[in-house]
Image (cartoon, rainbow, N blue to C red):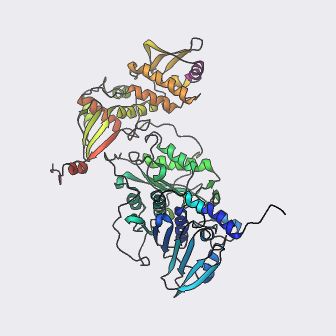
Amino acid sequence: MGRIQVLSKEVINQIAAGEVVERPASVVKELVENALDAGATAVQITVKDSGRHIRIADNGCGMDGEDLKLAFCNHATSKISSAHDLFGVTTLGFRGEALASLASIAKVACISRPRASELGLKAVPDTQGQVTLSEAGCDYGTIFDIHDLFYNVPARLKFLKGARTELSHIQELVQQLAISHPAVRFELQLEQGRGFKTGGSGDLKQTIMDLYGVDRPEHLVEVRFEDEATGYSLTGFTTTPDVYRSSRKWVQWFVNGRATQSSILAKALQAAYEGLMTPGKFPVCALFLKLPLAEVDVNVHPTKKEVRFSQPNTVYSFVRAGLLETLMKTGQRVVVPVVPPLPSLSRLAEPAIPETSLHEPRQIRSAPHVTSAHVSRPPLPGLAAGPAPYQMPYPVSNQVVQQLYDPLEVAPSGHDQTQLLQSPDFRVIGQLAKTYILLETPNGLEVVDQHIAAERMHFERLMGLYEHRHLEGQRLLIPVSRPASPTLCTMLEDNQALLAGLGLEITVDVEAQKVTVVQVPSLFRTHQVAAMLDELLVKLEETGDVQLPITDMVATMACHSSVRAGDVLNMEQMQRIVVQWKASQRPWTCPHGRPVSRLLSHQDIMAFFDRPSLPVS
């Protein structure tokens, strides 16, 4: 007798279910996506028994008896009819596997009624996919009732996490769906009163604020970027660099309306925020990328979490360019409160939503990613090219930079000094701990790290001078030497032309295994040369880069050219640092991504002292 056997339909469905239904959140995903594909404008999700009992009700188009009989058959779907359709899928679901898989591992009941029918039907499938139908009174739409999830798959039950973890996965998933469909009313009811509601107004910005705990509208900037040549568009919202989280779960990508995980998109986001945000931190964002359907393969994974791009380099460059343009257009810099509120996964504050029925008619605005305004712009030049040359914030001469570069040593005189130091936007009120500059601003008390602010300003000055070939060097009276391995000596030799362009000259003695700094930029604080050389050697040894990134070199030089924590500053010096820092292109962070300032708002201060208001000036 042969050893190869044909598996039963029940076993086949359970194997398929292992790919589609990984945990309770997978059930919610498949059924809510079906509801959205059915045109629902309101969805209610109720979860009990740690996710083993799930009820989902919607006001979509509903199913008649013929559809209900076929719905639980494997690979039965209304979304596609041929292989060609796979390259033009616009619905969230299309594989026709979810309901058959679900019926093989749980006790399922479905009640549905199309709008044109006066009476609904109840469908109860068995593990073989056979459906029993009976009449049922119900409103139009569809209700799925899932009991005893994984009742016949004990191995899957064994590997489920605790109730809190499973419910958190469900909540995060429904938040994601609500953000991708802000014109749909969502209501999630979890155990112990947990969950949330959305209003379904179509206001994406407000939905993000409600669900992701962004407390101030000005912290979210709108992304609107389009390239007519490729047919690409990028819309949505992202936070200013001052507002960040320690996890990527607040970053949501939607490709042609579908929630997506993509290393290409993640890298483009990271590149756009590089130097603006502390490494290891991430913005809060919901970004909708729209591409020609033929350029995206959504049939990569059974859960459709991943997509494949036919032009990944073009997608990367387009997204990076769009985010960079947005961040550069933000205008004013926004700083976060000292203690920013974070949303709890266990209980989210509900926005003010009037009590309405699931089936109550209402006026809604279309979702932004569907009806985003057309933004006309010429085709992007060289989408796959590297970053554009660094641009100076304004024209600058060596003489002006000589005056502005070191606030501790050089000060302009007369009218120039008065004009530079006067500012209606802030008032320097002192120095704290020889490290922080305190500013009185219209919004409250701003605390500025003096070293980081000076470092940002110096970095932009040096980059601009490097691009315009204006950096001049000064010979050191006493050269600074350090031992170096033969490998490091070779690397420095390979980078001498780059270093010379920065006004930095380092001689290399491979035989003696020694490197010596003999010239630095004329604006460099010479007592920091040794520390700068030490850091340069450490970076070379750690990264092993043969060709040094110019931005890394300039960032190192800017760091060691700036005032330090512990330097005592007078009022004029502090004012000069702040004026120059605020004039920079990217004032949010230092080149390494550390935040420059924090704001203690008037509201925070008044709340601390239980004061209702401030005196009118």
- Looking at the picture, how far across and down is residue 59, in whole percent? 48, 76
Q: Check the image and report above or below for 377 versus 421.
A: below
Q: Give the extent of the magenta segment.
A: 484-496
Q: Main secondary structure of the magenta part?
A: helix
Q: Check the image and report above or below for 493 versus 576.
A: above
- Looking at the picture, how far across and down is residue 361, in whole percent? 42, 78
Q: Is residue 196 visible?
A: no
What is the quadrant of residue 46 in the picture? bottom left
- Looking at the picture, how far across and down is residue 84, in whole percent? 70, 66
- Looking at the picture, how far across and down is residue 112, in whole percent? 54, 80
Closer to the camera in the image, 65 or 278: 65
Closer to the camera in the image, 358 or 15: 15
Q: How many marks?
A: 0
Q: Is residue 283 visible?
A: yes
Closer to the camera in the image, 613 or 405: 613
Residue 202 highlighted magenta (yes or no): no
Residue under the point 34% across and 47% down = 336
Residue under the point 63% across and 79% down = 131
- Farthest residue to the bottom: give it: 118
